[in-house]
Amino acid sequence: MNEKVLIADSELLVANFLKKIVEYDNPNELSVDIAVNGDEFTKFVTENEYAVIIMDLNLPNINVIDFVSQFSMEHPLTPIITMAATIDLNVALTCIRSGAYDFVAKPFTADTMMLVLKNAYEKRQLLLDKERLNNDIQQINDELVNANSAVTRQKENTDKNLTDLIEGIEKLREFSESVSQVKSVETSSMNLFLKIEEIFKPSALALLLNEEKSGNFIVKKENNFSKEFPEGTKIGKSQFKTYFSHIKVHEEHSLRGMEGYRTITLPLGSGNLIMGLFILDITNEDYEGARKVFYEIVRIIVTNILLTAKFFEDSRRSYLESLIAFLLIEERSHPGLKKLSEIVSSTAVKIARKMNAPDDELRNIQYASLLHLLGLTSAPSDLLTASNYFSEEKFPEIRDSILSGVELLAPLVFLDNAQHMIKHMYENYDGSGKPDSLSAKNIPLGSRIIRVAGEFHMFKTIFKLTEGHVDGLFKDNSGKLYDPEVVKHLFTVIKNK
């Protein structure tokens, strides 16, 4: 059954334009309904199920915000895209807080709306796939309960199977607990490789991930499969077509030609989504009796983890699109701040790398430094000047305006760590800063780095201070306002540009 999109806009011209956008590149064969007022919209929603809803905030005869809040709770699998002829940040945040997937300001381009619609539809499909996988896990668990009951009834004849069952359950518990943390698809798959190797001890193991752009599988990692699956090799998707026609564990003779061994393949996918494969060489004994079912459970657990990781990455992409929107708003109110934020972000990441910050912290430092001046969008345009910044009377006003950006970012849960860095950006190294009088290493690393990189480029770019003046400010305040180690790395980074 083809899915449908509902477009609600009182301007029929806009509604028809959106309909053409949906139908332009439509591999999923989405059909479109159009409502021009709240009464028509309510009738459509009551009588039909929709994959995506696109609606204008000013639709007559309906409170759109109230509808979004109620509908998103009752129908979490149907994303709602709101739109209005405004760039008011508070309006956009109100929509997102109420449960809307995204907010698009009018007028918009076809490319913009196509991208938002594509992301919204992909999010729906990921949620549907995740729901199906959870049902699969429940079904497997039910089968395990039944199998365990049968073993109990025939205990005298199945002592070996019972031992295998207990051992397998313990391995599954250990495996599930050790890979529960959500990371990127790349990081999660590598962690899974190591844990499968550690817990199940196959004699050979290979991980192949699907590359969406090329349509091929690439061998990401292998152990004892160097002849059959050299790392970095690209393999056409058609070679593994049969594994995904009916997704379950496949078994065959050992690909390495080892007597007493067999090769089992764990296809990682759900519906039309193909993530990759784990290929294991194990002993025949490891795949006998009750042990077979554990590899199917491992396949489902691994698929669920990678699906969650992909959902995490796609969500991060949506947040990054919001981040770019924030920077554009920042540029409109204070020309030059967007470029300054981008330069600060580049420098901050370089300093963080020199201080061996882990990848996740690097990413948060990048986001925080891009958004650290967002609070200035609500401040007077003439507030940020050198004379005000170095004034005991005016500096607190500038500082508080910048720190108010944390409140604007509060609805974006993905940016929690970045918000924390911005919040403590004006803690002084000697403990005399705001808001919590933190000192030295108690100040988050990202906050210390962004303070140094941000003020350096602000002094040079916005205030136009001389190089000697800037050098003197950092020399005099190193150990007071600034972390001396961060200052040292700053000038190394600047010198090596």
Image: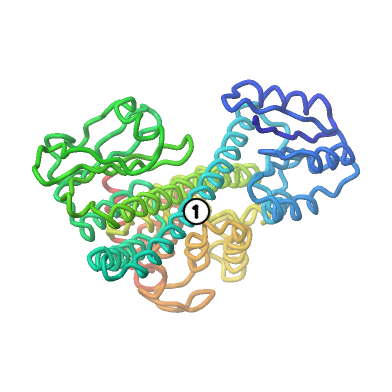
Which part of the image, by quadrant, shows the N terminus? top right
Frontmost residue, 320 versus 425 = 320
Frontmost residue, 128 versus 56 = 128
The percent coordinates of residue 344 (x first, y second) are: 44, 50
Frontmost residue, 317 versus 371 = 317
Q: Bin the neighbour count of mark 1 within 10 Å (Cα to Cα): few under 14, some 14-19, many 20 and up.
A: some
Identify whether 50 is placed above or below 77.
above
Residue at 35% from the left image edge and 58% from the top image edge: 471
Residue at 54% from the left image edge and 48% from the top image edge: 319
Whether residue 473 can be seen here:
no
Residue 477 left/right relative to 256: right
- Please give the count of numbered marks on the rendered protein: 1
Q: Amino acid at mark 1?
A: Asn
Identify whether 266 is placed above or below 154.
above
The percent coordinates of residue 435 (x first, y second) are: 54, 74
Q: Residue tagged by mark 1?
A: 134
Which part of the image, by quadrant, shows the C terminus? top left
Whether residue 151 can be seen here:
yes
- Look at the image and name its color scheme: rainbow
Residue 99 left/right relative to 433: right
Residue 475 position by quadrant: bottom left
Residue 227 position by quadrant: top left
Classify mark 1: helix, strand or loop: helix
The percent coordinates of residue 9 (x first, y second) are: 81, 34
Residue 312 left/right relative to 231: right
Residue at 18% from the left image edge and 45% from the top image edge: 281
Frontmost residue, 292 versus 272 = 292
